[in-house]
Structures are given as structure tokens and as C-alpha cells.
Image (cartoon, helix red, strand yellow):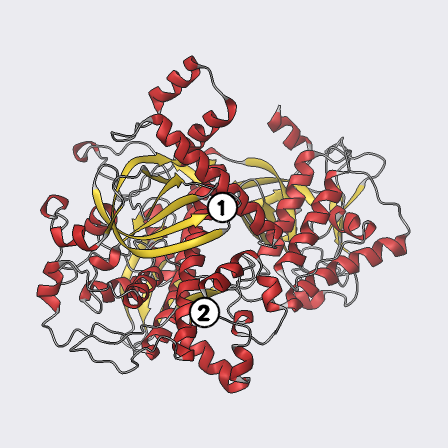
Amino acid sequence: MNVTSIGMHFQHLVVLELRKEVIEQNFGNLNELEKATVNILLEHGITDDQFTPEDLQGLPTSPQEFQIPETEYKRRKDFRSHCIVTIDPKDAKDFDDALHITRLKNGLYEVGIHIADVSYFVYPNSPLDKRAADRTTSVYLVQKVIPMLPPILSQHLCSLVPNEDRLAFSILLTVKENGEIINEWFGRSVIRSRCRLTYDEAWSIIQTTQSNPTIEDKSRLLEFLPKPEAPFTFQDLQNCLSSLHLIATNLRSHRIENGAISFDKLELNFSFPKPLPVMEKRTNECSTTLWPQGFSVKVRNPAHHLIEEWMIVANQSVARFLFGNFIKRLKGVQPFEITVDTGNNNQKWLGATLRNHSKPDRNRFNQLMNSYNEYHSYETNRRLPVPSVPTNMLGRRNLLVKIAKLNNIDFDSSSSLSLSCSVKKLAHSIAEKNSYNESFLLNLMSSLSYMTYIRLSVALYFNLDSMYNILSKRYDEEKLLENISYDDDFLRLLSFDPKSILKRNNRTMLNYTWHYGLSIPLYTHFTSPIRRYADLLAHRQMARILECDNSVYPELQVSFQSNNSIQKDIKNSDIDLLVAWCNDRRLKAKRAGEASQRLFFTACLRDYGPFYENGTVMDLSANKIRILIASYGLTIETEIKEFLKNVFKWQHNATVKEDDPDKGLSNNDLIPGKTNIITFTWDNTEDQTVQNSKQSEISILSVLPCRVFCLQNTLIPLVELVTSNHISNQNV
């Protein structure tokens, strides 16, 4: 295998193949957005090549070419008579999921969760399947999406577009108003979405049911909202969304009460100019990516939570179904043939791909608490009272820690419930202090959430068979399965009262399948097969157990069924490789998306900045400081001397004193056991807001006024400390 390295020279990126010692590619100036995007993709190992004719073999060439075969209407459950809706972002084209709800007798509801049936169009081990498995996930960049599947599927035949019959894999639930599930049905189906809504549109409709608008207001609203396809009316749409929202709200409350952790990640929306016609493009315009005109923060409303809750319910239901059948297989209640016979296709078990989120490393939280304790000890030794928070928010160190210590609040990460309680207690304590500036507290709480989030472990897919094989070698097999039943009622109870079951034995399988963040014992991904390969794998596993996996697009069967080189079934060892690959690619796709957001934000910063915002100190070493700008969800690391270049003088209390103040310091220069604090002094004429003291201090969780900027001809965000009146003047 050839070794590849990346080298930087005069801000131009080149890829060098060391064996041949020649330049293979020159990506141009990294300050161009298109070239910088290529760099992001290269760094994370993401390809943006086109689907080949071999990949598209057997698929329709256009949406008009495909019609659902009559056999599929007959063999599938038909939900086309229901008021089915989709709710997605405004710019979405791949509609994975749709919902319907019907009120039943005795206060019960029937809820249909319909997911695009991608497995109908992607033949196992075909060239397209291998390409999708290699990509693993769609990659969402600011200016484009690199899809896992070709557009003919992702945007047309699989996408649950409105007013078109579509094939789906459905979950039909009978639920109480509090969200408790009474019964479940799984199967392949035919649906018809009657209305495509954005999150804002869905929330506007839900609000009309809560606020009792006048007839005039309702008429004006109807002018701007999409109308459902006949025979359904706006009232039907209202009733549907209102009921879905009611139960989803109860589901969310119950999850949070059980300890689920919720972090709403801040994302940015970017606005772009309309593309110029080809003939009008400037001759020197080499980039196909448009320069952003501005940005705004994406706002999440309760309609986002509505979809999120029902997708979590669906994923839990599938995980329980797969786990229950796994237990049946182990106990011999429902025997599965282990031997693969590709000719007769009689392998009954394709594995169970679940998703685990393990407890965070306690040492990571201990390190955070040590810095808190270090600071608290410093305050005690100084014997200073806890100061109130001034409106200028400058020079007050670790207020969050002081509040936590005064109220005997500690961070307990032993369970998501205990961690949630710690954060809630802290938030409640802060809210009771009326003298605190709202913006100041918002930055502190955002910082706390961020510092907690980055210390959590990463959720991972795993193969249930392999996990059991490993555990059964370490522990007694009877203990692993003790008090675990394949009974449907038992499995559904896990969603509502998992703790009571797990307390009986801490060595059962359910303790190792536990999802820490959601605080539930069983979880998987099923609801986004257009953009996640792990979901497609779960669809195939479900279909095999339900004996409905013979539903495949006929042209694909003609193309691949007689091909002996195409093995339809999958081995257990192959599942292990697939889930490991999915874990790796999913994380890299996520990081590429974050890097793209940062790149385009910096482009806006360069043209429309600088911006003056409050920033929170996330980390502080001997010579570097990391600042979180919570309002943009952006962290910037910089040299301390660059961050403090506007101050009159400064001193790092936890570092060895140097004669040369400009000398760079490393972490080795920190004095062990000494609190990591910087003291600085403004020029008296520079900052008129500092009262009674010329000195201010900085430590972890200090909230400071910052100037966020970008130098011309670069795309690197920078940050520096400014006086608090810059923030005040900007808000005038």
C-alpha cells in the first residue's frame, strides 16, 4: 500500500505520494471555499465521486419509468386511506419518514410511523449496495449533500414525497395518551403522503389548535400553508398534528424524568446569492461554490421535538423486536437455521444491529471537578466573599463553581439520571439569583452543557450476537439472561420502567446494551435508511424475521438473482466489520459537516465581521486559551498573548515567571497544584467600566467580552479580549 502524506507550502495544499515522490494533486489556495471543502473531504476520507452505470444497474432511469407493481399492493398493508404527513427541514429532498394518527376508543390512539423502503431498491451485495456500505452515510456540507444513495432513489423513488404512492416499512402502534405502548405491528406497506410540511409550518398549525385564532387570522394563515391532498382538509391536518404533538410532549417528559440527556446542538443557516447564468459568470470565477451573504442561527421549535420523539419510539420498537427474537433464538423457542444456503435463501437470522452509548469515563469528569475544587480551594484561602455579578460581566471567575459549591451541588455521572439532576440543580440555583445578567448566565449554562457533552462517550453500533459471545465467555450464561423474557409485554415495559428490571441483576445483557444518553436499555437506528446504511441493515434483519424480505424491485432480481457472485445473505463476521465501518464513517461525516459550518462561518466573518460577543473560557494552559462563543456554537483556540494583546499587562499565576514576557510557554511550565488563573490590567484610559479595581482575572468558565474576527485573505477565525463596552455598544 502506498503511503500518502499531506504537506502545506505557501498556503497551497498538495498530496504527495512518497514512493513516487511526485505531486499527484494540487488543490489550489485553501482560502477558496471550493478548495477548502476538498481539503475537508480529504482530511476525513470522504469521496465525492459520481455513481457509475454499474452502481445504477437495474434501477429506473427516471421517476416516470417506475410504477409500483400490482403484486406489491396485494402483499403489503395499505395505509393510503390515512392522513399521512411528512415534517422536514425547508430545504430537504430526502423524506425518510412520515406519520399518521387515528383516535381509537377508550382513550387509545393508533400511530403509524412509516419509513422509506430502501431495501426494495438496493439488492444485497450488489454494486450499489457495496457503494452505499462504503459511503455508510450521507454527508451534509453547507453548500451540498454527498448522498449515500443516487438521486433517483434518495430524492425520488424512495423519498416519501407528497401526493405519490410510495413503498414503506411501517410500525403501527397502539398507544395511550401518556405514550405507553399497548401493541405493535411491523411490516412492509404502501403509503401516500397527503401533505409535506416544514418544521415551522407544522408548528404554526399546532399553535392554531392551542391559541383559538379568529376566523380572519385562520384564513390569513391558510394562505401561506400547504393544503393536504383531497379528501383531507386543514381540520384533519390540525387534528393529526395536535394529537401527535400531545403524545410526543408526554413521551419527552417521561424520557427526561427517566434521565435522558438532551443537548440541542447549535447550527447555522447560511444565505447565498442566486447562481448566475452560465454566460454571465465572471471569467476569473473558478469556484463552483457561492460565497455566503450572511447567516442565522437555526431555531428548533416543538415540531422538531415531535418528530424526534416518534423516531426514538420507532427505533426503540425495532430494537426490542430484534432483541426479543434474539432471545427466542437463544432459548430455542423460535429456532433459526444457522447454516447459510444461498441457493434456497433459507438463513433465518441475519443478526441484530443495535446501538449502545456507554457510561462516560469517570476520570474525564473527575478532571473537570478537580479544576472546580482547585478553584474553590483558591477562593477559600483568599477568604473573599462570593461577589455579585456585575452587568459588565468582566473579571468574574468561575461563578458557576461558586454557586455549585454554595449549594452543595456535585457532578455525578454514574448514570444519565444523576448527571441530569446535577445539571438541573445547578440551573435552578442560578435561576434563583436575580442579580445575574441574563446574557451572562446563558453563556455559563451553554458552557456547562458543552463541557458535559464533550466528556460523554460516543454512541456506537454493535452486533448483538458478537456481544453475547464475548459476555458469555466472561460471565455465567444463565446470569446474562436472568429475568429477561422475549415476551412482548415484558419488552415494552422496558421503555417505561427499565430501572426496576435492571436492579434485579447487574450482569444481564440489558446492562451492556444500555444507551446512556437516552437512558433506555435497547436502541437502534431504523428511521433513516436513505442516508444511513446501518438503518438499511436493520430493515433487512427485520424483513428476514418477518418473512417479507422477498419484496425486491423485479428488474434487480433479473439482474442479480442468477448471478452466483452475488451472495444475498450476510455472515455474522461480516456484520462485525460493517458496524465497525459504520461507526468510523459516521463520526468522520459528522466532523466534516462541522468543519464545513466553521468554514462558511469564517467566510461570513471575513466579509461582514468583526463580531463582538461574550465568550466563555473552556480551557486554559500555560500558553494557550480556548474560547467558546456560545451564540455561534464556535470554539476558537489561540495563544494567550494574542488573546490579551489589547490589555496593558497580564500575568499567568500558575506559570513559572519568565524574564521575557513574550516567551511562549508550554504546559510543562505550569506550577503543579497552583490554580490556573491569569490576572490582567487594562490601561486606565481604555476601560471605564472596571470599578474599584484595576485588575481582573481569567480562569476556566470566565465569561469575557470578545472580538471574533478573520484576517483578510485567510479563512481562520481568531479571537481577542476587548473591553465590555464593545458588547454594550453593539447591542445599542
Please name the amino acid that badge 1 sits on.
Lys
Tell me which residue sits at (24%, 32%) in the image: 276
The location of residue 338, given as percent across then percent down, is 30, 81
Tell me which residue sits at (38%, 37%) in the image: 292
Label for residue 420? none
Q: Nearer the viewer, residue 693 or 227?
A: 227
Choose top left, top right, bottom left or bottom right for residue 286: top left
Determine crowd level at label 1: few under 14, some 14-19, many 20+ residues with C-alpha closer than 10 A.
Answer: some
- Judged from the image, the secondary structure of the residue bearing numbered disc 2 is loop
34 displayed left or right of 446: left
Quadrant of the image for the C terminus?
Answer: top right
State how many labels appear: 2
Q: Which residue is mark 2?
A: 486
Q: Which residue is mark 1?
A: 176
Alpha carbon separation for disc pair 2 and 1: 22 Å
Q: Nearer the viewer, residue 23 or 275?
A: 275
Q: Is residue 620 visible?
A: no
